[in-house]
Amino acid sequence: MEEALTFTDPAGHKVAGILATPEEKTDRIAVLCHGFLSNKNSKTNQALTALLPPQGIGTFRFDFFGQGESEGPFERITVSLAVGQALAGLDLMSSKGYRKLALVGSSFGGLVALLAAAQRPRIACMALKCPVPDFPEMLNLEFGETGMAQWKATDTIPNVVPGGSGRIKLSYAFYEDSLCHNGFDAAKVITAPTVIVQGAHDEYVPPRQILKLSESLGGPNSVAWLPDADHHFSRPEDFQTMTTLLSNWVADHLNGPYAFGFG
């Protein structure tokens, strides 16, 4: 069963979400954080929503600021705003009686999940798909010195969506805000068991970021390298493997005897 929910972030913006629940009542749920220039109904979120409820686990997916159905112009999004919305989503689920919570994040959403989990130590587990713990480095590598200067001058970036063209509006304040958030430092205080599913041919995230993230995490973690996968897990077999690994990790840790959560 799916229910549309609207909640408010710390800055007062309305955030659109969808709660999907199993047939039988449960206190276990996975909060899903989508990627950059995506939305709550991303292919990954929909796949996880198909896989988890049959295992007795609900999912809660939501749109970040200015994306999907959530309030705000996308050009004003920041990492800080997104983290505030993820925390508000977690707290909403806790207020609804969910006691065993998992955080799942894709790419940009993986960074947001890291930063949010560092502030909610009772998260039961975390599952990350191609996370970007050092977003400023990734942006500099992707755009280069000339591209970064153009971004600062025009408040626009290239449309990085697969198949996209032209430029889209995004304030340079996004980059300046991202400099204030270090995923590696956040990882040091996270003790929740974490899995990272990463493509060996990721076009955006350097392998060194994933290796350093694994070393930085304060709890048990596992990195699953898919040898032929790109950032978007474009091949059907890679996508299926990725979603299976994420959902199995969440199910094992939320349904297992060692699961813990919000008391």
Image: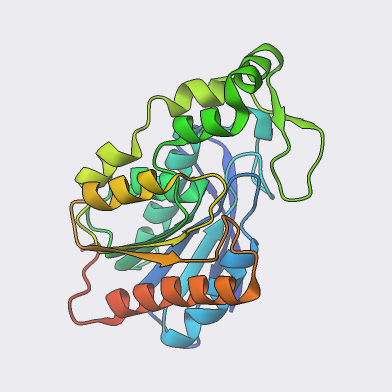
Residue located 47% across and 30% down the image: 136
Q: Which of 149 and 47 is in front in this view?
A: 149
Q: Examine the rendering and report whether any part of residue 77 can be seen.
A: yes
Give residue 198's position: percent from left, percent from top. Answer: 45, 59
- On screen, residue 203 versus residue 193, left or right, reads right
Number of numbered callouts drawn: 0
Q: In which quarter of the image is the N terminus?
A: bottom right
Q: In which quarter of the image is residue 249?
A: bottom left
Residue located 18% across and 51% down the image: 218
Q: Nearer the viewer, residue 111 or 118?
A: 111
Give residue 142's position: percent from left, percent from top. Answer: 59, 34
Q: Residue furthest right?
A: 166
Q: Quadrant of the C terminus?
A: bottom left
Give residue 199's position: percent from left, percent from top. Answer: 49, 60
- On screen, residue 193 versus residue 229, left or right, reads left
Give residue 107's position: percent from left, percent from top. Answer: 51, 50
Q: Examine the rendering and report whether any part of residue 22 can be seen.
A: no
Q: Residue furthest top?
A: 153
**Which coloring applies here?**
rainbow
Q: Which of 92 and 44 is in front in this view?
A: 44
Residue located 37% across and 72% down the image: 250
Q: Which of 35 and 261 is in front in this view?
A: 35
Residue located 54% across and 67% down the image: 19
